[in-house]
């Protein structure tokens, strides 16, 4: 008799908006050999289209409406309770527009990933495409990092860059950066689920070796 296969790592995706990254992850995890399973999608906005995408894919959803929480701590406590209920191996932030409290972040240290539309450490925070244009940068891109207490400041696992063209607008940049996001996030999540990437005290370990710099997928 064959032994039962090992259970797949459990993934919870948190999103706030349209959920195009969620969609890319749903499609990737549907592939037969993907080493993880999205067991739930959580949102802080009841109307987020990400919820619709999850429902279409028959993935359970939950909503913690931040406008109904008295404080950031109360919101995080509700979110934490919901996450404990699902007991995920990894939490994937995919356009989740809430700043999490340090206690929350510490509770999931090494198990929470975020995607950010810039080549970190450049341009933490919002409006990255506009700021890249204003600065006259020639390259831009996307970063995937472990979440730590520092906003958009956790060790970067992988990046993908795009060239900035003279006629680019924030919208055209956003579109090309998102194409890179949709390609890169499934790759990094696969690595995580395969146990290939870990957060150590000194940074990101890949296959047991400290990464001297983020993995880079260049625009082709
Ligand atoms: C992405 O650009 C991501 O980098 C940022 O929020 C956006 C989410 O987009 N953190 P979507 O909801 O996945 O379409």
Image (cartoon, rainbow, N blue to C red):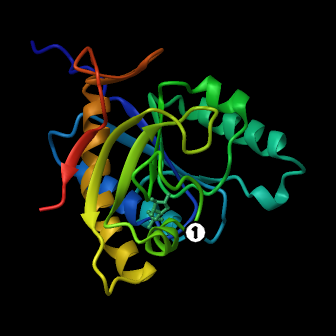
Q: Nearer the viewer, residue 170 or 88?
A: 170
Seen in the picture, residue 171 relative to 66 is either above or below; the reply is: below
Q: Is residue 47 left or right of residue 91?
A: right
Residue at the (59%, 56%) spot, across then down: 125
In the orientation shown, which residue stands out farthest toward the front?
136
Q: Nearer the viewer, residue 7 or 49?
A: 49
Count of numbered circles on the image: 1
Label 1: state its secondary structure.
loop
Q: Quadrant of the C terminus?
A: bottom left
Name the spot of residue 162 as percent of width and height, x first: 26, 64
Image-quadrant location for residue 48: bottom right
Residue, far bottom: 167
Where in the figure is residue 179, as x and y percent of width and height? 28, 67
Left or right: 181 as drawn, with respect to 95: left
Name above or below for residue 175 compared with residue 206. below
Q: The N terminus appears in which quarter of the rendering? A: top left
Q: Residue at x 57, y 27 (%)?
A: 108
Compared with 134, 104 (above or below) is: above
> Callout 1: 10 Å neighbours few (<14), some, many (20+)?
some
Residue at the (31%, 67%) spot, across then down: 138
Q: Where residue 63 appears, x then y in whole percent?
A: 65, 55
Residue sitting at 63 percent across and 24 percent down? 107
Figure quadrant of residue 163: bottom left
Reply above or below: 89 against 27: above
Label 1 within 8 A of ligand 1 by Cβ:
no
Judged left or right of residue 90, residue 68 is: right
Tell me the residue that label 1 is attached to.
48
Name, please, the residue furthest toward the right.
Answer: 70
Name the one closer to the observer, 153 or 7: 153
Q: Position of residue 183 (x, y in %)?
A: 24, 56
């Amino acid at each position: 008799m064959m032994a039962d296969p090992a259970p797949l790592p459990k993934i919870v995706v948190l999103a706030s908006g349209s959920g195009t990254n969620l969609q890319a992850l749903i499609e990737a995890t549907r592939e037969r050999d993907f080493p993880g399973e999205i067991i739930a999608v959580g949102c802080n906005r009841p109307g987020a289209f990400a919820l619709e995408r999850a429902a279409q894919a028959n993935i359970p959803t939950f909503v913690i409406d931040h406008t109904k929480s008295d404080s950031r701590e109360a919101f995080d406590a509700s979110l934490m309770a919901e996450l404990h209920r699902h007991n995920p191996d990894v939490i994937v932030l995919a356009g989740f527009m809430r700043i999490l409290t340090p206690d929350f972040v510490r509770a999931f240290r090494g198990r929470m990933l975020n995607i950010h539309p810039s080549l970190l450490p450049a341009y933490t925070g919002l409006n990255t495409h506009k700021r890249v244009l204003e600065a006259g940068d020639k390259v831009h891109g996307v970063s995937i990092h472990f979440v730590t207490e520092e906003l958009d400041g956790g060790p970067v696992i992988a990046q993908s860059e795009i060239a900035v063209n003279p006629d680019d607008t924030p919208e055209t940049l956003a579109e090309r950066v998102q194409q890179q996001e949709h390609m890169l996030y499934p790759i990094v999540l696969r690595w995580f689920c395969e146990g290939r990437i870990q957060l150590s005290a000194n940074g990101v370990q890949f296959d047991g070796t400290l990464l001297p710099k983020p993995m880079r997928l260049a625009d082709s």
